[in-house]
Amino acid sequence: MTSNKTYDYVIIGGGIHGVGVAQAAAAAGYSVLVLEQTALANGTSSKSSKLIHGGLRYLETAQIKLVFECLSERALLLELAPDIVRLEPFYIPIYKNTTRRPWEIWTGLSLYSVLGKLKSDTRFESIPENKWSGLDGLATENLQAVFRYNDGATDDAALTRAVMKSASTLGAELVMPATFISSDASKEMNVVNYSVNGTIHSCKCRLLVNAAGPWANLVLDKVNPTPKKREFDLIAGAHIVIDSPPPNGMFYVEAPQDRRAVFVMPWKGKTMIGTTETAFNGDPSKVRPLESEETYLCEVAAHYFPKFKDLTRENIDSSFAGLRVLPHATGKAFSRPRETTFHVDKKLAPRIITIYGGKLTAFRITSEKFVAKFANMLPKRKRKAWTNKLKLKPVLSLITAIFLSTISTTTTLAQTSPTELSLEGALEIAKESSYSMRIAKYRELEAETTRKQVLASGLPHINGTIDYNNFIEIPTQVAPADAFAFPDYLNTYLYDLGVATGVPINAPPVDPNAISEFQFGSPQSASIGFTATQLIFSGSYIVALQVAKVFEESKAITTAKTEVETIKAVSFAYHTCLAAARNVETLRSALKLTEKVFQETKAMAEEGFIESNDVDVIELSVRKLKHELANSELQQELTLSLLLFQIGLPVDTKIELTDTMEGLRQKMNIEFEEIDVAESPSVMEQRYLYELSDWNFKSKKMSSLPTISGFYTNSQNAQRDVFNMFDFNEKWYPTQLWGLQIKMPLFGSFEGKHIRKKALVQTYLAATALELATQAAELELSAARAEFKRATSSILEAESNVQLASRIYDNVTLAHNEGVKSSFELTQAQNDLLSGEGILIGSQLNWLNAHARLKAATTTISK
Ligand SMILES: Cc1cc2nc3c(=O)[nH]c(=O)nc-3n(C[C@H](O)[C@H](O)[C@H](O)COP(=O)(O)OP(=O)(O)OC[C@H]3O[C@@H](n4cnc5c(N)ncnc54)[C@H](O)[C@@H]3O)c2cc1C
């Protein structure tokens, strides 16, 4: 398939650099297409150490400019993407035998702080010895000092997705999966060919950006004519993730094996350790951590944390490796420059630009520099935004699929395999896409617009007018003929003059009953001008400003309240799905077991050991179980659809839940803080409504005050016999005036008094509703606490009942197999076990829901 569409930019690669350039280019007004062969951030951009940092260690190799730039970007990203980039404490322990001495670290941190413009987040300190025991079990033998400073941490893949989303809202398109196949730069434009699910597509572009990271030179091989490539080394860096509670900060340690820097850090509720530096040759998509690298990282962790002393590769939960693109050299990878380079095919008129190297942290500034550098290669475009002002919001991969489907017509989203969905993931998606959240966000936007609209109504208004009139007939005015008769003194004068000159001069005779006709003005007239008005004082306007502000704040609270409710509803739905799945699972294994017993009993009956009635009893059980299982499977499907509906996704989306009831229970924090219900979202929302009604009352009172506004008018008028308005030799007559207008209600038949009274009653109603909401929140809190307590005790009881029923069932099965117990007793024991398991599932569900309810009831928002 061929498309004739022409873009300013086609970008190969949906890593951080590809999407960063897409965002910066789209913000500058260029048309952009991104091609990504697998998924956003599937390359290095999801395999990094997830740090948004200046790179303290780059100070050792004097990469000052890079550190300064990265620290500025860190500050900006903390502001633009508070949900994706956060500040974390970093700890540097110094031991007797570590390479760097405390004074060296102190100097480095001081310089780091200066480069970070001495902002509060660049402060550092030395942790006193009596606090070392609180450092996640860090080994203290030979420990001399521990420094603490702050640096940024992120979810690299989430950041990449958020940047692409931002680019797409500015008009950038993404096609994924789409593999760049070839391009021909010999023509006037680059003709780009790419394949989507085996079908070839083409488009044209003025600039082709090769942001394929480690694949960059493989991409250049496919470009015609093939440009000169830059030599680089691929250095693999591996991380391992251990299923151990996350540390309370990042530990920056020195590997005892080779003195390299290694991080031990929190990652998604676990502990992550990385990285290594190993030269890599081969297909970048095949990079995996080597066994030796995994062992190396386990040893580093064990060396610094006695709790990991037995850590081996077998304990690794997951691991990944990414490829650094570093300038070709023979020295250690660590000391090579980390700056990004833009490599062009032709110096004077580049068509293909390759991005080599770089850091996640600096993606925005790198991309801005990129777009600025090649701006003169492209037609002038109207800028849409500045990237240093664009907020970045998290987008989960599932949402990515959905939003991509809306922005790219050529994207084929092969959703053949189900998408894995954890509870946390479901909640994140719901916060963005559930119907209630979407409505709440639109309401918030509406409120913000209302505030701006109110504000604007008090600013100067300027109206221009252009008038043109062409009289086909000029209006005729009539008046009594004597209205214009000569006055008596003039008649006398004319008579005297006639006598004196001998020429009689008499005024025409006037018929007092006749009327005269007059036509004033010229047939063609035009006027052009403007009037500026400015509100000077309006009591209602002042109040309206306050109301709009409170309204906007109240909508933000409503969104927060909706979020709490959405989290609760989605959690309930997710828990119910898990319970339904567990139910199906339990019934399936019960059915399997009963079918086995049935076969064995049947065989025994055929040999005459037991009566055939026994076989019938068990067969009946099998049938009942099959029936129940079919029902439960239907229920399971229904609960999944319900969950998707709550999340705001199409109900036929294929998903697979990754959490389990037990897993969730273990993960959940069961300590709930004491709260002041006045800070709960529902009470705060009501308080805002009360404030709004109070303002409404004030505004009604203010409406009896005068409104004062000023105006200024300036116009030019033309009166012509023919249309020659554009003849600049003809005259235009100016008119100018200014004035004040005071409006004041004088008498309104007591309507105003009743309106004010009604507004006052509404404040009483709102005050009562606030009291009601406070009491309801108190009640909900104590009910939720009681329910959680009850659920906790019943789950313990249900667990011990299942253990008992399971023991009984095992014994009865044994006895039945020996012919001591009847089939009736066996099915009875099985029913008891099944009902016990059913009760356990029910009480686990109740516990999880009670937890979600209590969490919602204890959620507060500080104003
Ligand atoms: C181990 C490690 C740790 C790091 N830690 C940090 C850190 O903590 N902080 C920091 O700031 N930086 C860090 N970095 C650096 C940073 O991660 C990288 O600079 C950055 O992710 C590179 O992004 P990229 O877009 O250039 O490449 P990639 O993320 O690799 O993106 C290239 C994309 O191109 C796509 N592609 C390739 N060929 C084609 C084709 N033919 N058609 C279509 N698409 C194609 C790939 O699928 C891939 O998605 C680290 C790097 C490594 C290796």
Image (tube, rainbow, N blue to C red):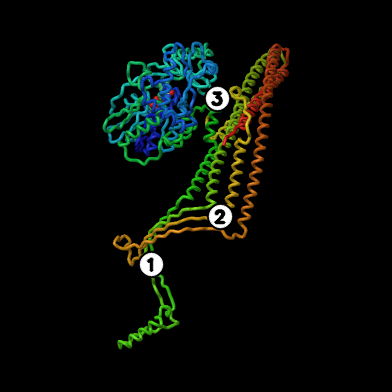
Mark 2 and mark 1 residues within 8 Å of each other at the beta carbon? no
- Spatial CA distance of label 2 from label 1 is 45 Å
Label 3 CA crowd tier, 10 Å (few <14, some 14–19, many 20+): few
- Spatial CA distance of label 3 from label 1 is 81 Å
Q: Amino acid at mark 1?
A: Phe
Q: Position of residue 169 (x, y in %)?
A: 44, 37
Query: What number is the disc on residue 705?
Result: 2
Query: What number is the disc on residue 210?
Result: none
Q: Position of residue 480 (x, y in %)?
A: 44, 78
Question: Cβ(mark 1) to ligand 1 < 8 Å?
Answer: no
- 703 horizontally vs 785: left or right: left
User: For mark 1, what is the residue?
Assistant: 471
Q: Amino acid at mark 2?
A: Leu
Label 2 CA crowd tier, 10 Å (few <14, some 14–19, many 20+): some
Q: Position of residue 688 (x, y in %)?
A: 59, 42
Between discs 2 and 1, the one toward the N terminus: 1
Q: Residue at x 54, y 30 (%)?
A: 426
Is label 3 in a helix, a strand or a loop?
A: loop
Q: Residue furthest left?
A: 348
- Spatial CA distance of label 2 from label 3 is 64 Å
Q: Residue at x 51, y 13 (%)?
A: 139
- Quadrant for residue 48, please give it: top left
Between discs 3 and 1, the one toward the N terminus: 1
Is label 1 in a helix, a strand or a loop?
A: loop
Q: Nearer the viewer, mark 2 or mark 1?
A: 2
User: For mark 3, what is the residue?
Assistant: 658
**Image quarter in which the N terminus is found:** top left
Label 1 CA crowd tier, 10 Å (few <14, some 14–19, many 20+): few
Between discs 2 and 3, the one toward the N terminus: 3
Q: Amino acid at mark 3?
A: Thr
- Quadrant for residue 723, please give it: bottom left
Q: Nearer the viewer, mark 3 or mark 1?
A: 1
